[in-house]
Amino acid sequence: MPLRVLIVDDSPVMRRVVRRTLELSGHAFDKVFECANGLEALELLNANWVDLVLTDVHMPGLSGDELIRRMRADPVLADVPVVVISSDRADERVERLTQLGARAYLKKPFRPEQLGSILASLTTPGVPDAAATL
Amino acid sequence: MPQPRSDEAVLEQVLAATLQDTAFVLFDPPAPEAREAGPYLRACITIGDARDTELRLWVPDALAVELAETVLAEPGAEAAQVSATVGELLNIIAGAWWAEQPDASRATELGVPTVDARADRPATHGLSVTLWASGVAPITLEAVQRA
């Protein structure tokens, strides 16, 4: 089934990179939304269902950490998988975001097949959750 | 405190991986028609606990436009888009570089990339590496310890 995905990043360049990587990942998409920070994302999520959120960490307004925290506290959004995409590869950062509820952590730079693998693990019934850090 | 490991192999690996994966740039040995002419776009970013290391990236103007058009997947990139793209690429390079340092398990302090248009050709003072995009255009990455 085509996926509905939300990309959250304050950099228009990175949003384009992620969108293009999605297109090359081998998955079909019904809709790809884009937001520049966590506040915009929460507003969009209140009006639109998505299968997956791909978010940066450091953003003005509302960070990726806080976005995850608020989604996990919202009964409607609590089960929507969140994948963190970041240049920050530090183990302590990955661990903290995973504890907050991120389902996978994708380190930049990344290839379409890496993103595709995460999408498959998080959105395909019967495929084990990768809980991946790539 | 452990000092960052700034060897050329690490610089080369993070530069090549980032540009190949993000902008589909291929690197080859310099070709006979290699372009050395500038001007260059120069991007800088500080990194580390005290932001005591600076990474500097030089990209020839013409190649920077090609990079932006590839990354953004649209022709006719404007100057601001080109600068933003090169800055974002350096941000990714910096994160990948930090991950190769001895104390990389700690969270990174990355500065905001700055980009200067029409910079002079690379005049490196620290450790640096130059790769040739498709064999014809040089991209230089330098790691400098700040005082």
Image (cartoon, rainbow, N blue to C red):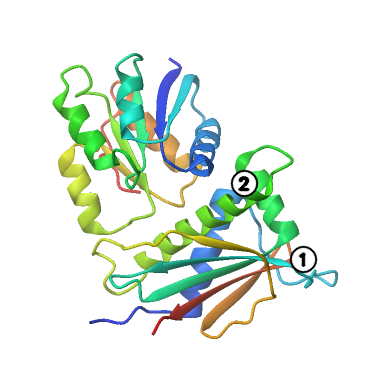
- Up-down: is A33 above or below A24? above
Q: Which residue is mark 1?
A: B136
Instruction: Kindly indicate whether the residues beneath marks 1 and 2 are on one polypeptide chain.
Output: yes
Residue visible at 71% across and 51% down in the picture = B66
Q: Name the spot of residue A6 as percent of width and height, x first.
A: 40, 27
The chain under label 2 reads: B
Q: Looking at this view, is B38 or A112 the one in front?
A: B38
Residue B81: which disc? 2
Q: Quadrant of residue A88?
A: bottom left
- The answer to whether residue A124 is visible is no
Q: Residues within 10 Å of mark 2 (few under 14, many from 20)?
A: some
Q: Quadrant of residue A1?
A: top left
Check disc 1 and report its element: helix, strand or loop: loop
- The answer to whether residue A66 is visible is yes
Q: Looking at this view, is B70 or B55 the one in front?
A: B55
Q: Name the spot of residue A125 as percent of width and height, x first.
A: 30, 20
Check disc 2 and report its element: helix, strand or loop: helix
Q: Looking at this view, is B51 or A126 the one in front?
A: B51
Residue visible at 69% across and 75% down in the picture = B121
Q: Quadrant of the C terminus of chain B?
A: bottom left
Q: CA distance from mark 1 to mark 2?
A: 23 Å
For badge 1, the amino acid type reads Val
Q: Name the spot of residue A58 as percent of width and height, x first.
A: 33, 47
A1 on left or right of B3: right
Q: Quadrant of the N terminus of chain B?
A: bottom left
B81 on left or right of A103: right
For badge 2, the amino acid type reads Gln
Q: Residues within 10 Å of mark 1 (few under 14, many from 20)?
A: some
The chain under label 1 reads: B
